[in-house]
Every structure is written in C-alpha cells, then in structure tokens.
Amino acid sequence: MSDRCGIRAEFIEGNVLDRRAELVGKFDVVFTTYGTIGWLPELSAWAANIAAYLKPGGRLVFAEFHPALWMYSNDFSRVQYSISIAK
C-alpha cells in the first residue's frame, strides 16, 4: 500500500479492542474509519489502545458519521432502508 501511495509507511490492520504488545508506542498516526464506534459495546478499551499505540505527539485520525445515514439511498434522495428498534 505505501508503494502505491508513494509514501514511507507501515499499515497494520487489526481488531480495535485487541492489544498487541509488539505495537505499543510504535505509531505516528492511528486511523479509525467509518462505523467503528457505533458497533462497540463500550469505548474505554478502544480509547486505551489508541493511547497505547501512539508515539508521544502522535495523532488520531478519526472518520465517522451517525448510523442513521445508512437508512438513506446512495444519493440521499429517499429513505431506502428501515431501522428496527429492539424492545
């Protein structure tokens, strides 16, 4: 991936809740993408991993949106998918 992007980088994919000791304090940037926090039962383990993996002065890049967005059609012109609420 870094060759395709023309940058010197190491990309690691993993479960946001799993701690990998060999990665602690290793990264300048931690990236979390769409839909991550909406599916987590609680956020402390996720946040603790981000803090553990970042080098001092590192940055979190966090891209997210509200899950209600998923009920609309691709062009956002109409509600296409229903949302069921568990009782």
Image (cartoon, grey):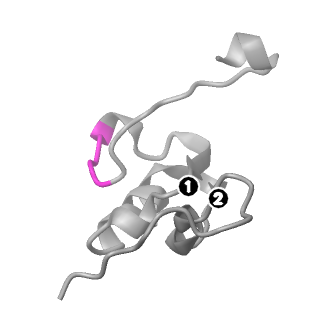
In depth, the one of 87 and 34 nearer the eye is 87
Q: Residue at x 34, y 34 (%)?
A: 22
Q: Secondary structure at mark 2?
A: loop
What range of the chain is rendered magenta?
17-21
Looking at the rendered structure, the kind of residue marked 1 is: Tyr
In depth, the one of 48 and 56 nearer the eye is 48
Left/right placement of residue 46 relative to residue 85 reads right
Magenta-span inclusion, residue 20: yes
Looking at the rendered structure, the kind of residue marked 2 is: Ala
Query: Percent from the top left, x then y, of residue 60?
Result: 62, 58
The single residue placed furthest to the right in the displayed view is 6
Q: Secondary structure at mark 1?
A: loop
Which numbered tag is attached to residue 34?
Answer: 1
Does 45 sit above or below residue 86? above
In depth, the one of 66 and 47 nearer the eye is 66
Whether residue 47 is visible, yes or no, is: no
Give the quarter of the image for residue 7.
top right
- Marks 2 and 1, how far apart in space? 6 Å
Left/right placement of residue 23 relative to residue 60 reads left
- Judging by the rendered image, the residue that carries numbered circle 2 is 63
The crowd level at tag 2 (other Cα within 10 Å; few <14, some 14-19, many 20+) is few
The single residue placed furthest to the top in the displayed view is 3
Q: Quadrant of the N terminus?
A: top right
Q: Are marks 2 and 1 in contact (CB under 8 Å)?
A: yes
Query: Percent from the top left, x then y, of residue 63?
Result: 64, 58
Does 15 sit above or below residue 3? below
Magenta-span inclusion, residue 70: no
Query: Percent from the top left, x then y, of residue 72?
Result: 60, 64
Magenta-colored segment: predominant secondary structure: loop
Query: Percent from the top left, x then y, of residue 53?
Result: 46, 49
Q: Quadrant of the C terminus?
A: bottom left
